[in-house]
Amino acid sequence: MGLTGFFLITFLVVHASINACIWFNDGGETFTFYAHFMGTNTIVHFMEAGLFVGLILHVVDGLLLWKQNRDARPVQYAYNNPRKNSTWYSRSMALLGTLILLFLVIHLYDFWAPNRVEYVTTGEEKDLFQMMQERFESLPIVILYCAGCFSLFWHLLHGFKSAFQSLGLNHSKYNKAIEVAGIAFAIIVPAVFALMPISMYFHLVH
Amino acid sequence: MNLLLKIWRQKGPNEQGKMVDYPVTDISEDMSFLEMLDILNDQLVVKGEEPVSFDHDCREGICGMCSLYINGQAHGPERLITTCQLHMRSFKDGETIYIEPWRAKAFPVVKDLVVDRGAFDRIMNVGGFVSVNTGGAQDANCLPVSKIDADKAFDAATCIGCGACVATCKNSSAMLFVSAKVSQLALLPQGKIEATERVLNMVEQMDVEGFGNCTNTGACEVECPKGISLENIARMNREYIVAGVMSEEKKEVTGGF
């Protein structure tokens, strides 16, 4: 989980950075330039395939863990008080991951899939900036995207530092730094994502 | 103190169990939790009922025999103690107290609150040792150990194998126990020789026994009566990854990293 998690974290950085270009307020010119590169470059296409493999491995590994861990306790406690010893989000990674996955299906259906279909059939790309503007006119969609980002926030809050621990990277000198970096990452990246639909809804992006 | 106890009663390994209510009266807050159970059992014997079976031995927190999941926490509400060190002053008059056995597939219930922790012994059997031939003791200076390593090995070795980590973990994972046993030897020169096989064999046996996987919730470290650190789990993960990649032996690596 840690390895694939790290891999997906690197993707989040790229995705958030490119999409943040919408805030240049240049009619999406910078954003479209990079989005065009990501959508048409052959090497990026191979990396994209790798990303899907990484995502699927992360999901399958997670589901296997969930199954094994559930089987490891056939009889549950009549009364359990886990709040006394662990955070709810660290115990709910499978649930949070499922929510993110559901969001991801909707998200890919909104942007990635139509753009790929267009590219394969006509060789042209859709205007993703315009698609974003149209999509985020709808309040329910904006709320849905914010909810997806909120799930991602909790998932990363545990996942970031947990990945280090799983790979054995635990050292009294650096643990604090990893923890702080994890909290910062979990806040910044989902916040950047959530601010995109919000700022588009309020027409703050031209 | 007057209390209502809700205790798991189960006649045998294959019997159906259930929670049974037992009101107890005039309990002193200076009693230990196990003394309170002794009093309950005295009363049950007088009434001609079957006393509640529970594990206990030294009653001073060093043997690792006592267990009990009390009010949703391993060894009860206090930190860094075993159930035998828990006193009734930690509870309020009139409180309802749930008392359950450790719950894990790898720890089957023997009777009432007694579980079979033989899985831990079998994990120890495959690697929790150093193979040292006897003979004349060599000079201690021939085996220098740094103070830091000695302290860390000692901290890991304070694990009493009570199983609270497994009971507390939402995945019934035994990682804290196994990592403590791996660490206490891996940190010392005598244990380094067999470090590779040790970590592979012990992790393999841990999986065979049906324990769950670690998802780093950190609950085990909080509930451990000896304060065994999560650092040990990271060390075992390191040892395991390196052993899986570098070892000469062909062993299937089945981790969920």
Image (cartoon, rainbow, N blue to C red):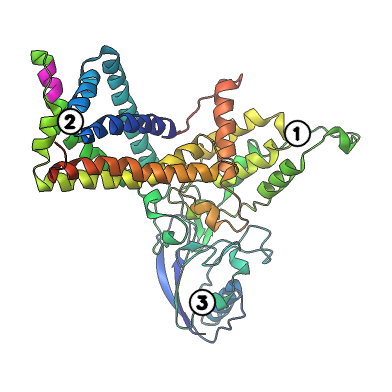
Label 2 is found on which chain of the structure? A
Q: Position of residue A194 (x, y in %)?
A: 24, 43
Residue picked out by circle 1: B189
Q: Of the numbered discs in the image, which one, if any, rests on residue A26?
A: 2
Pick the residue in front: A51 or B177.
Answer: A51
Report how far apart the C-alphas of labels 1 and 3 lie in the structure: 46 Å
Residue stretch rendered in magenta on the structure:
A115-119
In this view of the protein, can residue A29 be seen by the observer? yes
Pick the residue in front: A48 or B18.
Answer: A48
Q: Is there a contact, CB below 8 Å, between mark 1 and mark 2?
A: no
Pick the residue in front: A181 or B251.
Answer: A181
- Work out whether disc 1 and disc 2 sit on a shared chain: no
Q: Of the numbered discs in the image, which one, if any, rests on residue B91?
A: 3
Label 1 is found on which chain of the structure? B
The residue located at (32%, 21%) in the rendering is A50
Q: Position of residue A88 (x, y in %)?
A: 38, 54
Earlier-in-chain disc, 1 versus 3: 3
Q: Is residue A115 left or right of residue A180?
A: left
Q: Main secondary structure of the magenta part?
A: helix
**Given this view, does label 1 or label 2 mark the residue nearer the observer?**
2
